[in-house]
Image (tube, rainbow, N blue to C red):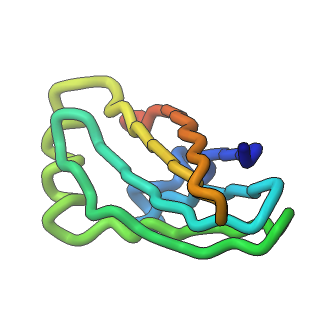
Amino acid sequence: MPKLNVALSGLNKALRKHRVRVAMRCSERCSISLGTRLQHVRKLKARHRDLAANERAVITIKLSKSTLKKLRKRLKHHPSVRVKVAVRATDAAGNTKAVHRSGRIRRHH
C-alpha cells in the first residue's frame, strides 16, 4: 500500500497568479491521478503523473480565463470558494490509496 503525502499551495495568490499548486510524494513507484474541484464554480479536468519512489512532484493547475471569470463572480457574493483536491495513487501491485485535501480561495479586500 503506497503512502501518499499531499499539500495544496498558492491559494492566497490564485487569482493573481491564475494557478493553484499541488505538491505530492509517494512512498513507492506509483501512478497518480489528481482531480480538482472549485466548489460552485467548476470541476477541472483530471491530471495524471507517474512518480518514482519518494519523488516529490508539484502539479500546477492553471486556471483558464473562463474559470477565473466564474471564480471572481462567485467571490463577489461569497467571502471564499472551497478548493477540493482528490489524489489517488496506484502502485505496481494495483493497491490504491486516496487522499483528499481542501482549502479556500478568499476574496481580496
Q: At 85% across and 63% down in the image, what residue appears? A: 54
Q: Where is residue 79 in the image (x, y as percent from the top left)?
A: 32, 24
Whether 60 is drawn above or below 15: the answer is below
Q: Where is residue 107 in the image (x, y as percent from the top left)?
A: 37, 35
Q: At 51% across and 48% down in the image, what residue appears? A: 87
Closest to the observer, 81 or 45: 45
Q: Is residue 15 left or right of residue 78?
A: right
Q: Which image quarter: residue 62? A: bottom left
Closest to the observer, 38 or 72: 38
Q: Where is residue 40 in the image (x, y as percent from the top left)?
A: 17, 34
Q: Which image quarter holds the N terminus?
A: top right
Q: Is residue 44 left or right of residue 91?
A: left
Total numbered labels: 0
Q: Position of residue 10 (x, y in %)?
A: 58, 53
Res. 109 visible in picture = no
Whether 41 is drawn above or below 68: the answer is above
Closest to the observer, 2 or 39: 2
Res. 62 visible in picture = yes
Q: Which image quarter: residue 45? A: bottom left
